[in-house]
Image (tube, coloured by chain):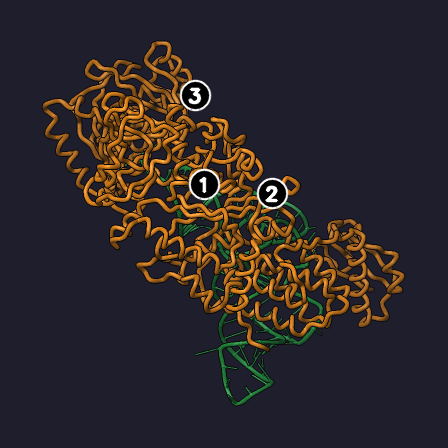
Amino acid sequence: MTEINFKEIEWKWQKRWEEEKVFEVKEDKNKKKYYVLEMFPYPSAAGLHIGHAFNFVIGDIYARFKKMQGFNVLHPMGFDSLGLPAENAAIKEKIDPAIYTQNSIKNFINQQKKLGLSYDWSRKIDTSQPEYYKWDQWIFLQMYKKGLVYKKKAAVNWCPSCSTIIANEQAQGGECDRCGSKIEIKQMEQWFIKITDYADRLLEGHKNLNWPEKTIAMQKNWIGKSYGTEIDFEINGEKWPIFTTRPDTIFGVTFMVISAQHQKLMDLVTKEQKKEVKKFLEKIGSVSEKELEELEKIGVFTGSYAINPANGEKVPVYVGNFVVADYGCGMVMAVPAHDQRDFEFAKKYGIKIKQVIEGKITESRSWTESGKLVNSEDFNGLDNEEAKEKITQWLIKRGIGRKVINYKLRDWSVARQRYWGTPIPLIHCQKCGVVPVPEKDLPVILPKNVKFGKGNPLETNEEWINVKCPSCGEKARREANTMDTFVNSSWYFLKYCDPNNDKEIFSKEKVKYWMPVDIYIGGAEHSCMHLIYERFYTMFLHDIGLIDFEECTPRLFHQGMINDEKGEKMSKSKGNTVEPLEIIEKYGTDTMRFYLISEASPDKGFNWTEKRIHGALRFIKQIFSIFEKIKFGKTSKYFERELNKTIKNLTDYIETIYDYRKATIEIRRIFDLLEKENEISREDFEKLLKVLSPFCPHIAEELWERLGNKTFICCESWPKAKKIEEKEKEKDLNEKVIQDLRQILKKFPEKNKVYLYVLPFEFQKINRKKIEKEIGKEVFVFSVKDQNKYDPENKSKKALPGNPGVWIE
RNA sequence: GAGGGGAUGCCGGAGUGGUCAAACGGGACAGGCUUAGGACCUGUUAGCUUUUGCUUGCGGGGGUUCGAAUCCUCCUCCCCUCACCA
């Protein structure tokens, strides 16, 4: 067999696709659109990793498939190029972040082209360009106008290493999402976006999403809606509301616990207890977050007492490490009898445990199940679920309680004290206060000359920071914070529809044609960040009348993780990464593409095993060898049927994405079968190449051309499967039975009666008369399900119900 | 603690009531082609028989069914996400 020069073939087709603008699309009212989108990457100097390749290839197969199905396919790509990593890398390497970013993007594009991805590069987006972030600023101003942007002093997550504030979503587990440093909690004036206003809609909207269940569950959990009661406790003559979901247990309150991070904690600490409390705060401040997790619940008495409004009882107020400061009211009513955390705390400090719900409390466990109320005055005997409502009503009537809904979701802290981000379009004027930059002055361009070091880089450029107030014309200063990069990625898919529009954010018409995104593909790690922000942005843009839908990405697919051979996560530091370019160099792009999806379902991911790539390579080579050997003529009946089946299956498999792997199997199967055939019609062979082309686009184009075609195979239409008639299936079945019986009867020519036991779903299809006629014996047909018709005299196990088969006598 | 997903042959991984000793790939073994091969081709890869056929078998126990890898139930183990959310 002649050597195949994959590199040459790939390069040739990649060049042609580009030159002839095969994947560039325009709005076309006569054609149905299809929008395939992969999450755009964060460009780094390291280039694409194998996870990117996996993500893009999954999308590319789908886009190519849809294109062949006749859709007008929008398949764009861009770069989420603002953000801390670029800034940090640039500082480290002492180059301008802009240059660093442009180099990275160039490198990315080069690699993406080598993957044979069918992007419309004319729509490329680069969020670090003023033409793009101008509209980030514009959206920000719209939010500002609507009162969704506000400033407040708040406890924020401060990353000392990145020297910036980061959002809750990015500070999970007390560690910086970017650099892994321990997060400090600081009190600072900060800009927030009121995403909490949209909490309910974000939850409601889940109904309309065809998303992985898990992702929806994660978002629900993140938004964390819970219904409860807020009850006023009196401490030192002051009202202190607390939130509880268990008002039914109010008579069992034996102490209160306030969070160690509570802003007003010191108001409760008495002179006598100050020393103790300080010691305690130091203690929990000195242990790292991780150790804290393993620590038991600890606390100290504040010296104050609270009055339980239900029964007037005086209970001690503790400060504890297990109460979250920014959830609910930062203080809880503790009911040790019916809450495990309170129980452990009470046991440790010898606090009274008062049972108010019937149930068994042991030495180590509280009773958290339901039951009837006891020790609860007028409410005794009530079922606790019922009591929740009754007690709440009773508290409401007395004016010391209200029904409330609580969310875990916090407002989005959007300001970053860093350079490489979108400048916030606000101006601080001594006279006028905060003044938004007029829309005509947008974009506020990120200045060049800044100094990195301590503090905010933007403040080091005097020329930039000092402006005239747009309102009064007096001296004013620009807001020196930049926006969180999640702002940039929250609406980029809309800009793809109209990327070069600088008059307006996008043409409504164009967006109407292309949106929403029909399939969005990306990693599951974005479930609680990007995928919440993005939905929020969409809802906002809907509310200001720019778009007429509330979800941009109604269908979502998460690709799985690719780990190393041992199943460990790939990382630079471990040195176990796989470089897509090296693999392409060694085995060719089509081999890699085929390998990527033939290992496992794309949602599951797999462990990268170099050995197995050989299997994919072998298959690619097999196609060439078949191509060289095959004679064109007439397709056999058998192969025709099989090909038909294959086309039908492939169409279904690709559609789901989850079944890509099955598609590769189906393709292998059909080529294996073809190898055994003597000849095939040219038309049928071309069908085979067509169904191969989304997976292995280069060799499909190459062979298509070698057949003498002048067109691109990727622009051809997807073969249609013929419907297989039910009657034909019946015919097949009967023929098979006759064939089998003939075989068996050869050995027993003297027998005259044939008892045929068949599967229930085959029973109707069996043509008894025809079989009798063909084999010349008396035939009795039974369904295996039907015991009554079974002849118990038959001792053959073969004829027993449950075992379809034949009995002959 | 809450939520999500798993356990299949030497390995990866399909299969969600009968056409299942279980697709497909990898590996291993045997044979062929070759000077040789990590290149290619053919076959084998639960056990007994080796042609039909039987037995065992899809994490473990129990159940439903004429029939279970597949349905129900209990148990064990593993992975992921969020976690002291009141």
Q: Are marks 1 and 3 on the same chain?
A: yes
Neighbor class of circle 1 (other Cα within 10 Å; few <14, some 14-19, many 20+) is many
| Residue type, mark 3 in image | Asp
Between discs 3 and 2, the one toward the N terminus: 2
> Considering the numbered disc 1 on the image, is that residue within a helix, a strand or a loop?
helix
Q: Is residue A728 above or below residue A173?
A: below
Would you name the residue on which mark 2 appears?
A33
Residue A426 image offset from top left, x and y in percent: 31, 30
Would you name the residue on which mark 3 appears?
A383
**In the figure, is residue A663 to the left or right of A789?**
left
Q: Provide the letter of the chain coloured green.
A: B
Kindly report which numbered mark, 1 or 3, lies closer to the viewer in this rendering: 1
Please identify the quarter of the rendering in which residue A701 is found. Answer: bottom right
Give the distance between the C-alpha atoms of the residues marked 1 and 2, in whole angstroms: 18 Å
Which chain is indicated by disc 3?
A
> Considering the numbered disc 2 on the image, is that residue within a helix, a strand or a loop?
strand
Q: Provide the letter of the chain coloured orange.
A: A
Q: Residue at x 87, y 58 (%)?
A: A770
Residue nearest the viewer, comparing A766 with A407:
A407
Residue A522 seen anywhere in this rendered image of the structure: no
| Residue type, mark 1 in image | Tyr
Which chain is indicated by disc 2?
A
Q: Residue at x 65, y 43 (%)?
A: A31
Neighbor class of circle 3 (other Cα within 10 Å; few <14, some 14-19, many 20+) is some
Kindly report which numbered mark, 3 or 2, lies closer to the viewer in this rendering: 2
Question: Dividing the image into 4 quarters, which one contains the N terminus of chain A?
Answer: bottom right
Q: Is residue A727 above or below residue A192?
A: below
Res A492 label: 1
